[in-house]
Image (cartoon, helix red, strand yellow):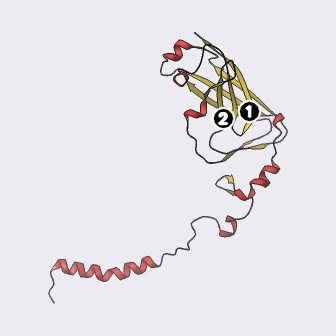
Amino acid sequence: MNLPPSRLLLLAGLLALPLVSSLAADISDTASRTTQPDKFLSAPGLIKGGLFMQGSKKRFEGANELNLESYQTRLEVAPAELSLDRIRDPEPNDQITLKFTLKNESDKGSTLYFPTAQRCEAVIRDSEGKVIYTWSEDYEFAQDAGYSYLNAGEHLNYQLTIPYQALRGKVPVGESTITANLVNYPQLRAEMPLRIQP
């Protein structure tokens, strides 16, 4: 039988097809997709991806009740005095820099739980206490819960920046207050005066 080369190629391809499909059928759907044995995936209290699994959350929270009085907070703000003219017409790099420090003054370490990727919040209030700026409204945060462990005697530092542009049209002349706190722990906060000159 004399077939043209193109038909021979097609025939050879069709004959090889059952061989390829039989190889594909050998791949098992039940193959493990994790690197852990199944018996460890549902055990309570294990760590998965660096976070405590949902089954151990209540037990974890009970074992780690925080004594909030054992923490010391500090807030540094630079500059502490702003010009309303500069806020209205800022340079590209004009910003307020906040450094919020949390120190564990107890004799044991503790773990702080955060419901999202955000760890710190900053708010500016006018002289009457009305909120005129909230730092987190300018950002989006992953909705992934997380933990931070703080050993006895150690501290965590968080640095936030507020561009002058974000304050344009929001801050009045006079005394304001800037407050920073840990998300999920509003009691762990510190505040500083912020003066707005004309």
Q: Nearer the viewer, residue 172 or 122?
A: 172
Q: Earlier in the sequence, mark 1 or mark 2?
A: 1
Residue 111 in the image: state x and y as whole percent: 75, 44
* Residue lying furthest top: 198
Q: Is residue 113 above or below residue 133?
A: below
Q: Viewer-nearest of labels 1 and 2?
A: 2
**How would you rate the neighbour count of disc 1 (Cα within 10 Å): few for under 14, some for 14-19, many for 20 or more?**
many
Q: CA distance from mark 1 to mark 2?
A: 11 Å
Numbered tag placed on residue 18 in the rendering: none
Residue 53: quarter of image? bottom right
Residue 175: quarter of image? top right
Q: Nearer the viewer, residue 64 or 36?
A: 64
Q: Residue at x 23, y 78 (%)?
A: 9
Classify the position of the C terminus by image quarter.
Answer: top right
Classify the position of the N terminus by image quarter.
Answer: bottom left
* Residue lying furthest right: 107
| Residue type at tag 2 | Cys
For label 2, the SS is strand
| Residue type at tag 1 | Leu
Q: Is residue 42 visible?
A: yes
Q: Which residue is mark 1?
A: 102
Residue 144 in the image: state x and y as whole percent: 62, 48
Q: Residue at x 68, y 23 (%)?
A: 76
Q: Residue at x 18, y 77 (%)?
A: 6
Q: Is residue 118 above or below residue 145?
A: above
Q: Residue at x 81, y 42 (%)?
A: 66
Pointer 1 with pointer 2, Cβ within 8 A: no
Q: Nearer the viewer, residue 29 or 152?
A: 29
Numbered tag placed on residue 120 in the rendering: 2
**How would you rate the neighbour count of disc 2 (Cα within 10 Å): few for under 14, some for 14-19, many for 20 or more?**
many
